[in-house]
Amino acid sequence: MRKIKSLQLVVLIIISGLVGYYFGINHVKISWKNYKPSASVVNREAPPSLNVDFSTFWNVWGKLETNYYDKTKLDPQKMLNGAIEGLASSLGDPYTMYLPLQQNTNFKDGLAGQFSGIGAELGTKDKQIIVIAPLEGSPALKAGIKPGDVILKVDGETTNNWALPFAVSKIRGPKGTSVTLSILHKDSEKPQDVKIVRDTITVKSVVGWVKNAKDIEGINIEDRKLGKIAYVRLSQFGDSTNNDWVNIIGKFDLQMQTDKEIKGLIIDLRNNPGGYLSDAVFISSEFLAQGTPVVLEENAGGVRTAQSVRRKGIMYKIPIVVLINKGSASASEIVSGALRDNHRAILVGETSFGKGTIQAANDLGNGAGLHVTVAKWLTPNGTWVNGKGLKPDIEVAMDEKDQSHDLQLEKAVLELLK
């Protein structure tokens, strides 16, 4: 009896193996059946100035086409995009990157001020995907995402070795859909899963107001501190920033001509991830005399060229305090450095992000784009912020337990009321 049962067990194992083998073979056959040969290769020749042997590249391509078991995975365009992305990333510079069609579209939409996603500016640091800053009023901010957070996983997929554009494409998505991020907060040892529902993100790059100091929300000051404060917040340096800026500053100027109670201007660059270099020069020019250096560019040969004020501003004399934090990057740091080095403002808050390079954006003609780091930038005094950021003149940390009390804004107001 035991022999019969043993024999039955062996037969079942053999049948199971054959069934698995059959379906495995059948899947491969289906894959081959659905496989479409690669499109013909055009423009295969290298430029005359390039002396590189591409035989290994084509050898690998051919072996993948011939030997890879699942032919449905062999998409020539994806393979080409992957090769180009690898070419750009081989430089080890997180800001030099190839952007396929969708990723390039996402990038442009962000600078235009409207896209669908969670509303967080991402970057890379120490080969990790990190949050530079959540945008004001965004799903990310409402979900508790903070500057400096490390994104370990997206919908359960580890972000190890992810390129920045790929991470952005994974996190963005249609309005109403959700994404789960595994987040490691700063000064925390245990990751936290955060589910965020995507929404249409509309970024108004410039907002501002003039208020009595005692009426400003989020701060506590003594009633004897009388006076009004002008406040302007820049969330990014994008397509509409300059026009929005001119409109608000023009209104401020009219008020200041008649209202002598306005003690000064606060420029809030906290959590501003940057944008166009030209916008940074434009904004800085509002406060500096024509010909004053705003930023220094240093090319590959070490030659430094100054970009200076080229337009007439209207705010040459008003006292200024600039607010920065670890989410202030790139163009934000250019404005902050220009105003401080030229003795037009003091910086209050926390040390900024530290992005000290300039990228040129190239459209490749097929919807794709290539961003290439073409130079360093330095403050007018020659400070390169890359990797270390700008240290504020007055360091003020936010109260993590009471976010409603804006200690940094409070300090800025008190400085202007002195």
Image: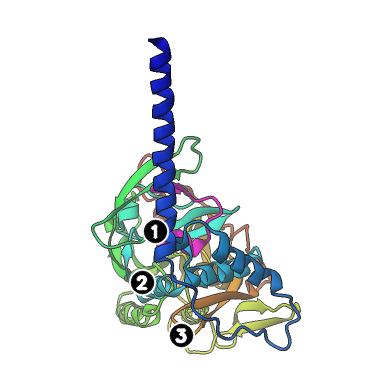
Asked if residue 360 is positioned above or below residue 9 in the image, the reply reads below
Mark 3 residue type:
Gly
Which residue is at 25% across, 61% downward? 175
Residue position for label 3: 313
Mark 1 residue type:
Ile
Quadrant housing residue 31: bottom left
Give whichever of discs 3 and 2 has the lower sequence position: 2
Structure colour scheme: rainbow
Residue position for label 1: 30
Give whichever of discs 3 and 1 has the lower sequence position: 1
Residue 183 x %, y %: 43, 45
Q: Tag 1, which secondary structure?
A: helix
Mark 2 residue type:
Ser
**Mark 3 or 1, closer to the camera:** 1
Asked if residue 22 is positioned above or below residue 242 in the image, the reply reads above
Q: Nearer the viewer, residue 68 or 172?
A: 68
Quadrant housing residue 268: bottom left
Residue position for label 2: 205
Residue 232 shows in the view: yes
Residue 151 x %, y %: 46, 49
Left or right: 376 as drawn, with respect to 301: left
